[in-house]
Image: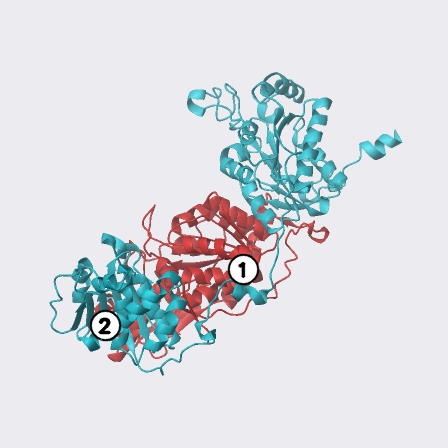
Chain colours: A cyan, B red
Amino acid sequence: MTILNKNVLQKPASFYDTFIRKGGTELKTTHYCPGCGHGILHKLIAETLSDFGIKDKTILVSPVGCSVFAYYYFDVGNIQSAHGRAPAVGTGYKRANPDSILISYQGDGDLAAIGANEIIQAANRGESMTVFFINNAIYGMTGGQMAPTTLIGQKTTTTPYGRNINSEGYPIRMSEIIGTLEAPVYVERCMLTDAKNIAKTRRAVRKAIHNQIDNKGFSFVEVLSGCPTGWKISPHDSKKWIESTLSKYFVPGVFKDVSEERESIPIKQERPSPGDYHKLMQIKHLSDLDDKVPTPAKTTFHEELKIAGFGGQGLLSLGYVIASVAMEHHYEVSWLPSYGPEMRGGTANCSVKISDKRIGAPLVANPTTLIVMNKPSMDRFENEVVNGGTIIYDCGLIDTPPKRQDIRTIGLPATELADKIGNTKAANMILLGVYASMIPHILSDSYIRWVLPYILENKAFHDINLKAFDLGYAYLKNK
Amino acid sequence: MKKVLIKGNNAVVHAAILAGCRNYFGYPITPASEIAEGSALLFPKVGGVFLQAESEIGAINMLYGAASSGVRCMTASSSPGISLKMEGISYLAGSELPCVIVDITRGGPGLGNIAPEQSDYYQIVKGGGHGNYKLIVLAPNSAQEMCDLTMLAFELADKYRNPTVIMADGTIGQMMEPVEFPQPVTTFPKKDWAVKATPETRENLITSIELDPDRLEVHNHKLQKKYAIIEEKEVRCEEYRSDDAEIILLGFGIVSRILQTAVDELRSEGIAVGLLRPVTLFPFPKKIIESYAQKKNIRFFNVFELNNGQMVDDVRLAVNGLKSVYFHGRMGGNMPTVKEVIGEIMKNMRQS
């Protein structure tokens, strides 16, 4: 008797001695009803955690259901979570802290109805966690409503005439579904009806947790469990019903087990020193480069550029180069791509502002300079250009020159010229050259020649880009 | 001054890493996807976790799990995705879990469009999820602030054990501007409350459930006390040429940039206009607005938003009837021009 008392009937050390979190006066008993399976499964898990010596590193996630209060009992790190979301919460936890043992403990409504996606996805990713799924074919906590696992014809408070397949469909077999996925390592369904089956469940619990200690991935144990209160029958009859009826639809067995074959994949987190972050993130400072070319002195300047045409003409890049160079010349800049309603009609544009002062609205409504490469954009923006402004346009693509008399207009067949030097796509760099040649005191041509290969990273186009820039830069002088 | 020309969305990713965030969970959505893509590219390089979740609900709950362990973590989405996250946000607030949520807002309701609207003000600032909770809400108006406020968001989240939101519209996210990145954060708060899978933290419990009404009320009072401290200490508001102003413009995010230009243009014509820009939407700068409302020389307030008039409610509460508060909003993803804003102000000047 003494031996029995000491070694067998002892409360596992992974349970609290008294259930203080439960509150009230009954601090030695659980809140579970007589005949409920939670208590037995809790004990099998707690014993395992103690036997494996992992109680300190175990995290138990308990979402909504009768077992939401698992933290009353388990002396481990506890996280209570939203209904059905425990596998996602567990994923976040385990990814952030891979040295832990993560257990998700869920009921049937939680796992197979509201949380069906979370469990399938966590299983399919092969998250390194152990999931215990109590299936009692009913919503116990909320008072006996239909569960996704409620049997056909079974009466519940929300299927008062019995579950009807034409309305509620069929009871869902989660172990079978999860067993078909590639990633899970071990999937078994057990039941708690008698000593033999409890022993089987015990082995399943231990294996599912040990797989996680071994870093083998996702293990899933479904446990058919009684809910005499929800079923409105006696604990004795509920055991019989599991044996005669529930386990005939949800047949116990192993649905997948690759525990032996599966390689152990420990997650290692290598953390570089914070001093290296800038380098690792490839934050480039052009001003750090040794061979850099001097920039002209900053002066009073305010430009509102609109660059517009078809997508693919390199107009956003053109804007980006101009903004980058101006920034390196110590001006305030902003670059805003056509975005949202601006995208209508398949044309692309960007707004670039350059100023010696702080920039307000980044969207250019009335450009001081418009660089335009297609007709729809010319039609749209010509009248928006400010009085005294400039339009630079590709006269090879736009056959009707601007009508405005109060602005400077520069037409050049940029695309044709780019074609002639070997690449249509370099038209934007020709326009860059023209634009830069108009404000040499703001944008330095020697700086642009130096910086282009750093800004436009595709090495295949370096030479042609420079050639195109030179052509554009000389264009107005030669004209 | 070493600056990089970078998109606001990408500045968020860099700033998160510099703030010590190593865990990103998210679901792609325009116009926030650059944040997920940038994180996918950069987080692994610094030994961090990037995980594309199965859903917005999955992502926010992964954040809940990661935050429980005491690490810095973040997610990003856009309006419809944020709607989906609301359950998780309420749980995060209830369990007092620090994390950063980025909302690059877009047009609604429903699927709406991907253009910039600010119609998430109610759902982010006033709730959206259930319960008596508040989020700390930061509203950047430049790429630099996308960096700075992201870094601040992690600090405030940890300091107050509270989810913190960066709420920026698609324009701020898509716009490139020069950004100067600070040095990485190297000291972090201890977080004794977290469950770290260690003997010392085994007793800890992360939960938002409390069946006993009295105890849940105590918890709620504790939260309200925390929010009151945040309101006392963390208000940030930019006051631009407002000292001697007779007309006060108000707007947050991208709108404030338009208003800033409008202020400059009107000032150059001798009209005494100033701008108040709430940088924190919660805590809202109500005392600052109230103090302007009490000034004799203030004629009226003019609020501009990219929505049907949401922040204006808070402005009216702060002004409390002392002065007229006019509102002009654009919806559907349209933005007012400077000219339009000035026209609106001139119209209200004639009225008041």
Q: Chain of mark 1?
A: B
- What number of labels is visible? 2
Q: In this figure, which residue is indicated by the disc labeled 1?
A: B157
- Whether A254 is drawn above or below A100: the answer is above
Q: Give the SS element for disc 1.
A: helix
Residue B66 percent coordinates (x, y): 57, 51
Residue B281 percent coordinates (x, y): 43, 62
Q: Quadrant of residue A314?
A: bottom left
B290 to the left or right of B228: left
**Who is closer to the viewer here, A17 or B350?**
A17
Residue A22 percent coordinates (x, y): 67, 41
Q: In this figure, which residue is indicated by the disc labeled 2?
A: A368
Residue B310's disc is none
Q: At 40% across and 80% down in the image, what residue appears?
A: A294
Amino acid marked by disc 2: Thr
**How far is disc 2 from disc 1 in space, using C-alphas?**
44 Å
Amino acid marked by disc 1: Ala
Give the crowd class for mark 1: few <14, some 14-19, many >=20 residues within 10 Å. Answer: many
**Who is closer to the viewer here, B287 or A115?**
A115
